Amino acid sequence: MTAMAPSRTEPDLSFLLDHTSHVLRTRMAAALAEIGLTARMHCVLVHALEEERTQIQLAEIGDMDKTTMVVTVDALEQAGLAERRPSSTDRRARIIAVTEKGAEVAARSQRIADRVHREALDALSAEEGKTLVGLLTRLTEGHLATPVEAPQGARRARQRIR
Amino acid sequence: MTAMAPSRTEPDLSFLLDHTSHVLRTRMAAALAEIGLTARMHCVLVHALEEERTQIQLAEIGDMDKTTMVVTVDALEQAGLAERRPSSTDRRARIIAVTEKGAEVAARSQRIADRVHREALDALSAEEGKTLVGLLTRLTEGHLATPVEAPQGARRARQRIR
DNA sequence: TATTGTTATACTCTATAACTATA
DNA sequence: TATAGTTATAGAGTATAACAATA
């Protein structure tokens, strides 16, 4: 399932946001997959290029769990797009260094992402697109700033073994 | 993880839609949980009230799989909010009949949903809210109308047993 | 003691397959 | 043959726990 369908009476905000975000996500995934990237790999690549960052820092930027970060960096390393390098200041931490090939791929993936976003907005004029982005940005500064704790589906701590 | 965080340079459409839809979803879930409903139960209840509908019809409206529908109706029945009744025209099908209690709960849950949507838009003026809904609606009629097939994550058909 | 990164794994969600009964 | 509903379960995604190395 993707999202709640609109009531016959009113297309509601829940449906609109769920639907548009889900479809955009699938389109982004499909477009990036053509060059062998996931959205997470793209995200990490781009932010690792900006400056020297550790896995934890990149995980925070991408809002990923650190364990999810591990598999993402594994994938980037296996594809030859990035490398783990010891931090010179903290021997626990690993700097994610983007390779030359990784930098090229990041440039391509950024163009792909920009294109997907342009296409998503193709039903709107340039001005309307800016209006939409502006209004959504203000939503993220209001009641929709932070998620509320999950009510029932919250995963309970695992039974402690020994 | 919830969604890709914004690049420092530009808050992009992917982040904005993912973030707002995710936060709204958690808020809706939390609000409906206070009266013991999930978003799916609310959706089924409301549409079953409108007219006589079978599980399959309600599943289509809510964009759920029919197996997901089964557990949703189970929950509604156990809560005494709806009942399965044989269709008079198709003995395979079940009409989902909302009980008196179910109708009361549906009225409350609809007020809750409306309130959550109002609160979500509280950072905007009434006019801006309408503009946002209008622009999102037009997005769903453009390139963001239908999801594209999942590229790699597509679930493969299960190994056939015997 | 707290934190980075790692492995292993358990939990949730949801779709797939197979089935029964009808059409 | 195809469809409505059901059960059981596989697969994907992701968070939790525990751990080693280091702060």
Image (cartoon, coloured by chain):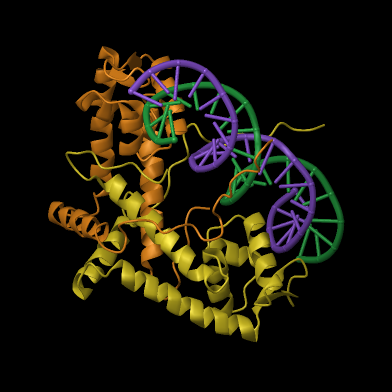
Chain colours: A yellow, B orange, C purple, D green
Which image quadrant is residue A65 in?
bottom right
In this view, the residue in front, A12 or A145, is: A12
Q: Is residue A129 left or right of residue A110?
A: left
Q: Is residue B155 left or right of residue B110?
A: right
Residue B141 drawn above or below residue B84: below
Residue D5 drawn above or below residue A156: above
Residue B10 seen from this side: no
For the point 26% across and 62% down, which residue is it? B142
Residue B158 image offset from top left, x and y in percent: 62, 43
Q: Is residue A36 left or right of residue A18?
A: right
Residue B97 drawn above or below residue A152: above
Q: Is residue A156 left or right of residue C22?
A: right
Looking at the rendered image, the quarter that the N terminus of chain A falls into is top left
Which image quadrant is residue A102 in?
bottom right
Looking at the rendered image, the quarter that the C terminus of chain A falls into is top right
For the point 38% across and 75% down, which residue is it? A115
Residue C8 image offset from top left, x and y in percent: 79, 47
For the point 41% across and 49% down, which residue is it? B22
Which image quadrant is residue B77 in?
top left
Residue A158 image offset from top left, x and y in percent: 68, 34
The number of discs equals 0
Residue C14 image offset from top left, x and y in percent: 48, 40
For the point 56% across and 69% down, which residue is it? A37
Residue D13 drawn above or below residue B38: below
Residue A120 seen from this side: yes
